Structure formats: structure tokens, C-alpha cells
Image: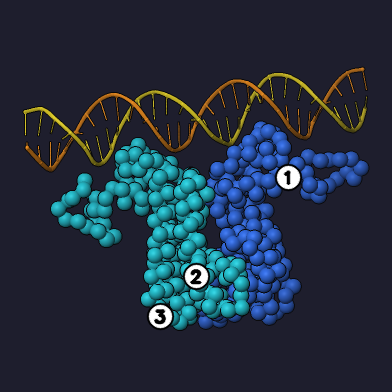
Chain colours: A cyan, B blue, C orange, D yellow
DNA sequence: CTCCGGAGTGAACGCTGGTTAACCTGCACC
DNA sequence: GGTGCAGGTTAACCAGCGTTCACTCCGGAG
């Protein structure tokens, strides 16, 4: 399966198998997990979503847990590296840094509602070691926010900044709950404005 | 309703006064469901949490689903009646109404983190009819907020107000994720300020 | 004392669902 | 034309869990 003549990378999928089967499975699983919860989705369901039977999954993943683990690890990593990168390229002004973080999180949430949903719903149904690793990444991402928020609120203690960051996450990640009725750009502006106001209040 | 003042009618559905075994079970189940997710919690676990074996639950509930259903229905009802009441006693000023709603939601979230968690995590694992009823109640609660928000944002369309309400819920309901580090009063003020700012931004 | 109904227990049943095993198939490659 | 391997398939295995059953215990009428 490796080394096909033409390597197609980014997310465009026209015909049967463009992204590797592995990626198809991960994406379909994320969708299903978001809709029903990982525990309510069977391996057969995931397989059916990509046109194969259940046990075929085991050619690509060690098991259902491994699927979920990789999914959550990827999300946490993408958030962490994306967040740190946005901050570092936003200059020294904490307001600009906050704006960059907010826009990043809003874009991520609007682009990947399924991942956002799974991210903080199914962390509990993960093996301890995997869960710990995900939590480590999450924590580091939160700390990126806390560092910026601490400069915006010099008198606030770290715990308050942490709570503030979580609250902003909750605000932005509410997108999956109010999906569809508003077009993306309007939603993005609304969330960005609200999050900024909440973060600087 | 409640005939026969002299004798004890117990079983029908009259008394919700004393902390009966039934209430113990509901509370313990809410705690466990919030921690691990309803699907990951066994009937035996719930029983053990109140000092009985698993099957004893069936003396008080028709089944695990009925337990979850009653839990979610109660939460939705409490939110709806509490919200409408707070608005009606807050006068005519939409700002005062918003403040009343925010404080109500903050208090509820801080007082019942487990219920909040279960409320929007395990709605999916509910029978269709129960889920529909819960969603109806949720919708009506959201509309209470939307009515107030619409008066604060006269130019905004209803969909935007709805998204705004969901975002504020996400913000306030983030408490379970950032628990413990901050004492209750500080957390309440922080959340109230942030939510107010986000709602009026 | 007896009877009855509420509450609980341990054992058993049956289904669901993750995982494994054995077998098949197409295709790349000497 | 075999050979090997990635990827699928069906059937079976097995554990967990919700639920039911038969039985017991106990407290309060009559």
C-alpha cells in the first residue's frame, strides 16, 4: 500500500480510496464517535462507514482503543503545536496573541466539530496511559493560553487564568451544539467577538 | 392526588419529600455517570455506590435507561422553570433579566457539576421518545435566553441569538472541567463577569 | 400469630460487541 | 507461473452487562 506513484496528501477526496484506508477509518470513526459517543459505536459501524466489515479494522489498528487513542492524541497535538505557533508569530503584544489564539481555536472548532466533540467527551474511555498523555498535551495547550491571559490580567492568580481559559474553550467549543443555522463566517465572527470579550472582561 | 391524609400511600408517585432510596440512587448514578459516562457505568456500580447489589435497582426503576431518562428530564425541567421564574421576577429591563439568567445558570452549574456534565454528554444514549422530550425542554429553555438576548441585540437575527445562548452555556458549563482550583465565590464572580461580557459583546 | 408487600440477594439467561482464527483474493515482483 | 503480502471476509469465541427469577428477610396491619 505504501509508495503509490502519486502521493496525494491534503484533504481532498474524490474517488474510492484517495486518502489511505487508515485515514478514512479515523475520519469516519471521528464522525460516528461524535454523533453517538465512542462507546455506543461498534467496530462494525466504523467498518460499514468506510465500506468494509468490522474485523477489517484490525488490519490498520490494534483495536478500538488504539483508534480512539490516536484520534485524541492527534487532536491534542494539533491544538498544542497550532496554538504555540500562532502565539509565536503574533508578536509581543498580548492582545494580538490572544486574538491569534482565539481565531485559531474558532477555526479549529468550526472546521472539526466532530473532533472537538470527541475530544472532551470520550477522554474518559481511554486506557490510563493514553489518557495521561492526552491530558499532558491538553495541559500544555492550556498553559499557552494561561501565559497570554496572565499578561492581560496581571493581578489575577494562575488558577483564575486557568479557569478563564477553560471557560473560553467551552464558549468556542459550543459550535457543535448550535450547528447549521448560521453560516460559517457569521459564526466565526460571533464566536471570536464573544470569546475576546469574555477573555478580557 | 394525595388522598388519604391518615394512611401512607407511599408507592404511587406522590412523595418526593424525604431522601428515599430512590433519590440516593439517582444522586449516586449522576455522580458516576458524570465521572465515567453512563454507558461505562454498570448497574452493579450504581448499586454498590448506595450499598446494595445491582438488581436491587429494579425495585426502584424500570431499568438503567429509565434512570438516565428521569435524571435528564429533571435537570431540563429545573433549568426551564428556574430560568423562566428568574426572568419573570427580574423586572422589565433586559439587562437585569440577562443578569438573572446568568446568575441562575452559574449557580446551577456550580451546585450540580455532575448533572451539568451528564446533561449534555449522555443525551445521546437515551430512548428516542425520552430524548425528544428532553430536547423539547432544552429548546424551551434556550428560547427563554433567546428572548432576552434578542432584546439586547435588536439587529441580530434569531439564529445568531441562539448560537449566542449556546456559547454562553458552553462558557458557564465549563466549570466541571476546571474544578477545584478556585473557590466557589471567586469562580461564580469570574463566570458571571465573563458570561455577561460575552452575552452583551 | 399470621399474612402481605416492599426491599434485597445470588444465580442464571441472553444479547451485544470486541477480538481472534482460518481462509480467500488480487497484485507486485522475481 | 509461483510466491508473498496487504487487505478483506465469514464464523466463532468469549467477556461483560442488563435483566429476570426464585427465594429470603422484615415490619406492620388484622
Q: Is residue B146 found left or right of A185 in the rendered image?
A: right
Front residue of A182/A159: it is A159
Q: Is residue B31 found left or right of D27 in the rendered image?
A: left
Front residue of A96/D27: it is A96
Q: Which mark is residue A91?
A: 3
Q: CA distance from mark 2 to mark 3?
A: 15 Å
Asked if residue A163 can be seen in this view, the reply is yes
- Give the SS element for disc 1: helix
**Residue C28 against residue B118 in the figure, above or below:** above
- Residue contact at pointers 1 and 3, CB within 8 angstroms: no
- Residue contact at pointers 2 and 3, CB within 8 angstroms: no
The picture places residue B97, in percent across and down from the top left corner, at: 68, 75
The picture places residue A90, in percent across and down from the top left corner, at: 40, 78
The picture quadrant where one finds residue A52 is top left
Which residue matches tag 2? A145
Q: Residue at x 26, y 53 (%)?
A: A19
Q: Are marks 1 and 2 on the same chain?
A: no
- Give the SS element for disc 2: helix
**Residue B186 against residue A200 in the figure, above or below:** above
- Residue contact at pointers 1 and 2, CB within 8 angstroms: no
Front residue of A12/B90: it is A12
Q: Residue at x 59, y 39 (%)?
A: B42
The picture places residue B193, in percent across and down from the top left corner, at: 63, 75
**Number of marks present in the image shown:** 3
The picture quadrant where one finds residue B52 is top right
- Mark 1 crowdedness (10 Å alpha carbons): few <14, some 14-19, many ≥20: some
Amino acid at each position: 500500500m505504501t509508495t503509490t506513484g502519486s502521493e496525494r496528501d491534503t484533504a481532498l477526496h474524490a474517488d474510492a480510496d484517495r486518502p489511505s484506508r487508515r485515514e478514512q477509518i479515523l475520519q469516519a470513526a471521528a464522525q460516528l464517535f461524535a454523533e453517538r459517543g465512542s462507546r455506543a459505536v461498534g467496530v462494525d459501524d466504523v467498518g460499514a462507514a468506510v465500506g468494509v466489515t468490522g474485523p477489517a479494522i484490525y488490519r490498520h489498528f490494534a483495536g478500538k482503543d488504539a483508534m480512539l487513542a490516536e484520534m485524541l492524541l492527534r487532536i491534542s497535538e494539533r491544538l498544542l503545536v497550532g496554538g504555540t505557533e500562532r502565539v509565536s508569530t503574533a508578536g509581543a503584544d498580548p492582545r494580538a496573541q490572544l486574538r491569534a489564539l482565539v481565531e485559531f481555536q474558532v477555526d479549529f472548532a468550526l472546521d472539526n466539530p466532530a473532533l472537538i466533540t470527541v475530544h472532551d467527551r470520550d477522554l474518559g474511555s481511554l486506557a490510563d496511559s493514553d489518557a495521561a498523555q492526552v491530558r499532558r498535551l491538553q495541559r500544555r495547550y492550556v498553559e499557552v493560553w494561561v501565559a497570554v491571559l496572565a499578561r492581560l490580567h496581571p493581578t489575577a492568580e494562575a488558577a483564575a487564568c486557568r479557569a478563564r481559559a477553560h471557560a473560553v474553550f467551552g464558549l468556542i467549543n459550543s459550535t457543535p451544539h448550535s450547528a447549521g443555522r448560521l453560516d460559517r463566517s457569521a459564526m466565526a465572527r460571533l464566536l471570536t467577538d464573544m470569546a475576546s470579550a469574555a477573555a478580557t472582561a
